[in-house]
Structures are given as C-alpha cells and as structure tokens.
Amino acid sequence: MRYIIIGAGAVGGTVGGRLAQAGREVVLVARGRHLAALAEHGLRLRVPEGESRYRLPAVDGPGPLGELRADDVLVLAVKTQDTVAALDTWAGLPVAGGGTAAERLPLVCLQNGVESGRLALRRFRHVYGVCVWLPSTFVEPGVVSAAGAPLTGILHLGRIPHGTDDTAHRIAADLADAHFEAPVVPDVARWQYAKLLGNLGNALEAVSGPMTGEEAQALYARVRAEGEAVLDAAGIAYAGAEEQRAARGDKVTLVPLPGAPRGGGSSWQSLVRGTGTIEADYLNGEIVLLGRQHGIPTPLNELLQHLANAFARERRVAGSLPVAELVALADKAAAHGG
C-alpha cells in the first residue's frame, strides 16, 4: 500500500516519517514554507532514538501524482476546519482500473474530534476513524518531533461509523511496524469521544499556556465536566478513564528531545505558527453544539471556543492570557449561563 499523507504536520508528518522508516511507500502533501522545506531538505523527524531525514515525494496536491493507484490509502491529517476543502480536492480523482477515490480508496481520518468522519462519509464510501494518542510537535517548516517512547503513539482504528475489516487490519499491521500500537476496534467513535473530552483543554492551553498550576487544572476539570454532562445527556458512549489508562499504560512516555522542546498541543501550535485558524469549533464547539441540541448549558466551552477563535483570528501570542484572568471570565460566564 502507498500512504498519501494529506496534511504532513505534527501528526501526519510523524506517521508518514515512521511509516517510511519502516519501509512503506509514503507521499507527503503539504503547502507553503513547509512544502518548500520538505522538497528541498526532506522531512526531519526527531524522536527519542535521534533525528532522521527522509527524502519523500512532497506535493501540494494530487496533480503531480497523476492517476491514483488502487493500493493507495488516503490519510487525512489536516485540521478539521480544512477537511471539506481536502475532501473536495481528492474525492473525484480517477483511480487506475476505473472509479474514483471516493468510490474505491480507503480514507483514514487521522484527526481530533468526530466531525471529519461525518464529513468524509458524505463523499467517501470507505472511511476509517482514528483515536489519535500521539504527542507530537510541528512549529518549524520541514521538522516534526514526537517524544513518545517506547511507542511513538497509540492509534485506535476502526471503520466509521462502526465495524472493522481486512483493510483496517492491514493498515494497523503497517502502523505496528512503525513504532505505533494500533488496536483495531469496532467502536472507534467511543474512543474518539473520550479523546474529545481530553482535547477540551486544548483551547485553554492555547490561550493561557500549559495546564500545570492548580487554577488551570481546576478550570479544565469544570470544562471537562460540562463535556461529560453533554455526552451523557446525548446518550453518547465514551471510554472511561480507567479503560484508557489500561490501554495506554506506560507505552507512550515523553522523553526530552534535544533542540525540540514541546511547548503545547495542536491548538497551541496553530497559534505559534500563526495559521489564522484553530480547531476549537470542532472540539469545544462540538460540546457547545450537543449542549444546545440537548438543552445542557455549556458556558465554559463556549467561552473557550470564542477566545481560541479570537486568538487565532487576531494572531495573538499563544498562552498570553493569564490564567487568573481566564478563570475570572469563566466564573462570569458560568454565572450568566453562557
């Protein structure tokens, strides 16, 4: 199988680099300065074993590839706000032997949240979801870092909306050869919703910095409690904390990487790179949406969604809102119900 990584950033670049290291055929899709760096210098992947460079085909879209192959696997690793554009670009492409990518090829949503899978099912017949547990960083063009050891990450994988098949198992086997654990599960959405609850802190970290202090931890607990209340009201199942701990154990322990400090998660990195967009509408915003649908107030998630979008739009400095000020805003929002 050839893996076409659509969005070779922190997660996509790490998975692509590790697959290439394991001898799999990989194409990286990127844009701007990152694409230029990949084309000129190759992908620099920093992991606990050291730094490696992989000179892989790097393109800005499907044009240079020509007709897609029947053994291609499309790995969608863009942020959710870029999903529709990516799906529109790749869905109608012809595949050798007849048919289109949307009709014939597997599309793997290697993304946070749950919305991309739903969007993909509108266009693609064979959609796979992944619960992404992969600490990784992309803030410098051409360079991605992944500090996990002994495994780089754990990627629960299954069909969307549910089920498994031979393709899922083949992809999982390739990932297992590439320093990942990839359990194939029939209920991948249950793992994705559990990860969503953890990702509700992404916006908090993006606007106020690492959640290391008691104030930040207490605020995150309140934000997560809103999320749990909404999922419960909606009747949406999610893996519990004990089940997640049992699955992860000490398989992915962060190791300091020389020259590659880990400053924050994906939303923080979006602000650092000055992309102008952020994923909050599909993380905290997913909880806000479900809350409105089921009559559950979600003032804290709504606040974080609003603040994260403002930070991205105005290109404000990541982590520049003091936690104490954020807590005051949260208390005010909670008092007014939103």
Image: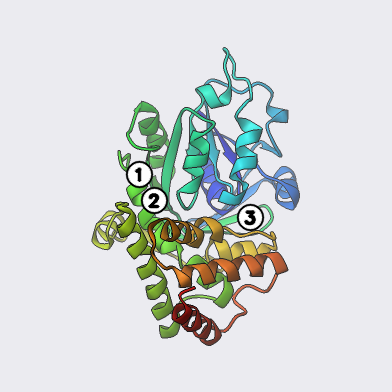
Say which residue appears at 56% left-offset and 70% top-offset: 206
Please report whichever mark, 3 or 1, sits nearer to the chain's N-terminal start.
Answer: 3
Query: Badges 1 and 2: C-beta atoms under 8 Å apart?
Result: yes
Name the one closer to the observer, 2 or 335. 335
Cβ atoms at labels 2 and 3 below 8 Å apart: no
What's the residue type where badge 2 is placed? Answer: Gln
**Is 311 in front, or is 59?**
311
- Give x and y (percent) for residue 236: 32, 52
Element at badge 2?
helix
Q: Residue at x 61, y 23 (%)?
A: 68
Q: Residues within 10 Å of mark 2 (few under 14, many from 20)?
A: many
What amino acid is found at the position of numbered circle 3 in the picture? Val
Cα distance between the residues tagged 1 and 2: 6 Å
Residue 143: mark in rendering: 3
Query: In the image, which is nearer the foreground, mark 3 or mark 1?
Result: 1
Marking on residue 243: none
* Crowd rating for badge 1 (residues with CA inside 10 Å; few <14, some 14–19, many 20+): many
Specify the amino acid type for callout 1: Val
Q: Image check: 247 left or right of 263?
A: left
- The residue at which mark 2 appears reads as 192
Q: Is residue 219 visible?
A: yes
Q: Nearer the viewer, mark 2 or mark 3?
A: 2
